[in-house]
Image: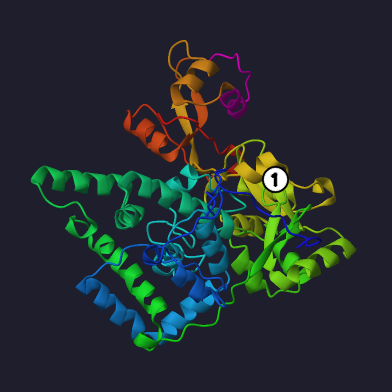
Amino acid sequence: MPGDPVLTSGTADGKTVPSLIPSGPLKSITPGQVGGFRIAQTEPPRELWDRIRRGFAMPDLQSELVTDREQWYSSRPDYIQRMTERSSKYLFHIVEELERRQMPTELALLPFIESAFNPQAVSSAKAAGMWQFMPATGKYFDLKQNVFRDDRRDVLASTRAALDYLQKLHGMFGDWHLALAAYNWGEGSVGRAIARNQKAGLGTGYMDLNMPAETRLYVPKLQAVKNIVANPIGFRTELPLIENHPYFQQVQITRDIDVSLAARLADVKLEDFKALNPSAHRPVILAAGTPQILLPWNNATVFQRNFDAYSQGQYASWTAWTAPSTLSTAEAARRTGMSETDLRAVNNIPPRMLIKAGSTLLVPRSAKMDEDVKLQVADNAQVSLAPEIVTRKTNVKARKNETVASIAKRYGLSAANVAEWNGVSASSAFKMGHQVVVYLPIKARAAVRASGPRNSVAAVKRSPSKTIVKSKRR
């Protein structure tokens, strides 16, 4: 409505939706033609389940597997209750998008099969979100995955991507059941299964193909849920009331803001805020990368009013810091004013790992870093780690005409380090047989020891200041 702090999203693909109202003057029909026309319902659905039923457009699948799944779901009323109550936050938006694209509304039930409508769900294969996107497929459909957010979990972005993908698959196979099989199994796998059946002179429908058990059950599961939604009384199932009304609004944010503060300003429980904004998996939302948040319908104006009136300091207590060079976690912690333990915990850095140059870390916001994070960082922030190489002090004998530079080259070290360890200049030469001090990774040190008795080795305690990082393996 005018005045609402809502950003109305445009069409996801920029395509216009054909009008359902015929153009031109009205034409009379004969009594014999009446049965050939579809009668439009003039009264809008009172609740969302009815609206979904009206949009069913996929052919029904008849199979013993469907009956089996119907019995499985209907015998678990608590499970259905949890799933459907969870779905109440998201279903209206999904149905709106399906109708706008003129797609079957059965597809609004697909997250029941994929994730039980849990936007935080992660599979053993690393598929994430309500629509269960794999990392590579998510990137193909422009779902950002970085340090600060994972759009595979985002309600709007993942729904847009899932429907784009389903439309693409339906265009490829011309059949919704095959499109769903491809969504689960992969378009290449379904295409090859069809080709095998064609070569053998067999049918190429969903039930004709040889496919994994999970994919074989995929459409029957959806059909079973569809049947229960179509006739809950027949399955002794009670569906919670979901009003035919938007659950959430999009609200613009102009500053980086802590997740906890955003929930407080909106007067929303933290778990409810996270349920609507599940892509924000860190304690801060960066306005450059996530310029809108979702809030329950009646809380949007509350947030806007409280945000404008907020006067208790900065909105965000966290920010992004990019490592200028490859650093140990101890050094990165010192530079950002954190303890090493806290830096590891906040950024999920395991022990004995180095932070590579260009990595972006979540750190406390301070007076030195009071600007909001830029778009380039908010959209592309990643953390790259490298194993910390353990070194030991080693003495090697100088060969004939040996120099600092030749020893450094032989062991893949820097000449400056070799010079420093031996108290000489980088241009110095050594007499033949001179004991030269170098610090080598343990594996390289073992190789030096095995090369012959002429090399004496002296091991000392590892010194963090003497850790050497090599960019290439020898």
Q: Can you say whether 342 is above or below 14 in the image?
A: below
**Relative horizontal placement of residue 357, taking residue 260 as reference (left or right):** left
- 297 up-or-down from 330: above or below: below
Q: Which residue is mark 1?
A: 321
Q: Residues within 10 Å of mark 1 (few under 14, many from 20)?
A: many
Q: Quadrant of residue 293?
A: bottom right
Reply above or below: 134 against 305: above
Residue bounds of the magenta highlight: 416-429
Residue drawn where x is 59% and y is 29% of the image: 421
The image quadrant where one finds the C terminus is top left
* 154 in magenta: no
Horizontal and vertical percent for residue 287?
72, 51
Callout 1: SS: strand
Q: Residue 344: x percent and y percent?
A: 60, 56
**Residue 354, visible in the rendered structure:** yes
- Point 31% across, 47% down: residue: 173
**Near-viewer residue (288 or 3):** 3
Three-letter code for the amino acid on which mark 1 is drawn: Trp
Return the residue nearer the eye: 304 or 194. Answer: 194
Q: Residue at x 36, y 54 (%)?
A: 183
